[in-house]
Image: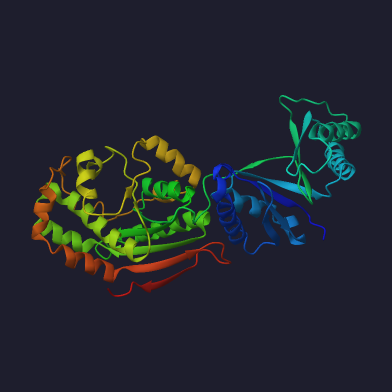
Amino acid sequence: MTFPYSVIVHYGELALKGKNRPWFTSMLVRTIESSLGGLDVVDVRPMVGRVVIRFGPAASTQWDEIRTRLSRLPGVGNFSRATHVAPDLEAIASAVSAAAAAMAAAGESRSFRVTARRADKRFAIPTPVVEREVGSRVQQVTGWPVNLDKPQLHIRVEILTKDAYFHFKKEPGTGGLPIGTSGKVMSLLSGGIDSPVAAWRLIRRGSRSHFIHFHSYPILSRTSQDKVRELVLRLTQHQLRSRLWLVPFGSIQQQVVVDIPPPLRVVIYRRLMMRIAERIAVQNGARALVTGDAVGQVASQTIDNLAAVGEVTRLPILRPLIGFHKEEITLDAQKLGTYETSIIPDEDCCTLFTPRYPTTAARPGEAEVAETALDIAGLVDRAITEAVVEEFKFPMVDLPVKTEHRAPDL
């Protein structure tokens, strides 16, 4: 079969996984297959330290979409659009020189170098010989000068057991670990700048992230829910499947306002959110909670208050942004593509019933004593019962697409 082109995917830290590498690689192959759904993919297979994707005829017009999808996928270090050739020196040299001649005929003039790699050392011809022969043929047909230090065109040749490939450009990937290799986490998603970045950092480390959003509808508008859906859609393009819990929190806040002194209200809000998130996480197999907390950014994120909030859950609370400042987080949000959605003005539960002077240093045991005025178990049960769950998938023919249903009764 003749392929219009193949894509060679290289991974970074997976190469360090020792005896576990085949499992990590198989997970990467599965996510690549899923991410390229709907495109003309013939097969995806691991081959000696890399993954090779072969495409059918329709892929000749699909490169932009293929590049976009692969660049978002955790576990992909870099990838290249490559031409498939027979593992024979004459075939390789002829194909590479023909491609270079076409570039020269189009008016391109550039310095170049050739780098060859033999993944299978049973290929008898040493790599320096391959590089010299291919380079000589390219120079004959183009007249381009060789520059080994800073070439304008880097021609890479990869020789495998039964195949060979050459390519001219590496595309950057997301890096990290394939989705599903680090378990499930539950991310608290506010709709602001920080929490989507925090979730993405865990996604890039191989964790499948599901999401919880606390809203105050109908006291406030649905804007925060709409924003969060857009953010989850964006994050789902990286991990392919997501689930979002929309938890009504306004009536709970009203109860807190009645029974809790103003300075402690924000801490109590957060403690209730952690209890609700923990219950949902445990029911759905998530092993940790993820927040966008950064030390000192707001009143609830001082060390004392973080300690008071975290003591209500037995699950680990992962705070990947804890030492970052706002400018760094904003840059990440812009690269991720969530920033423009996050800055849309909205009214969320974080701004509802916020006291003028919230405490920044909750004393040990202070919040626990204050909570005796509340029916904590009843508030948590009610929130979970009233939660709405939405499913997100990528790729799909018509985005955004989601299904909606009520959370099951406890």
Residue found 20% across the figure and 43% down from its top: 305
Residue 156 can be seen in this image: yes
Q: Is residue 43 left or right of residue 281?
A: right
Among the 4 quarters of the image, the one containing residue 277: bottom left
Measured as percent of width and height from the top left, residue 141 is found at: 90, 34
Horizontal and vertical percent for residue 308? 19, 47
x, y percent for residue 353: 18, 54
Quick check: 252 above or below 46?
below
Compared across the picture, whether 7 is left or right of 370 comes to right
The N terminus - image quarter: bottom right
Can residue 215 be seen at all in this image of the molecule?
no
- Render colour scheme: rainbow
Judging depth in this view, the residue of 270 and 44 nearest the camera is 44
Where, by quadrant of the figure, is residue 397 drawn? Answer: bottom right
Q: Is residue 282 left or right of residue 50?
A: left
Which of these two is toward me, 44 or 337? 44
Of the pair 52 and 40, the residue shown nearer to us: 52
Q: Residue at x 56, y 55 (%)?
A: 23
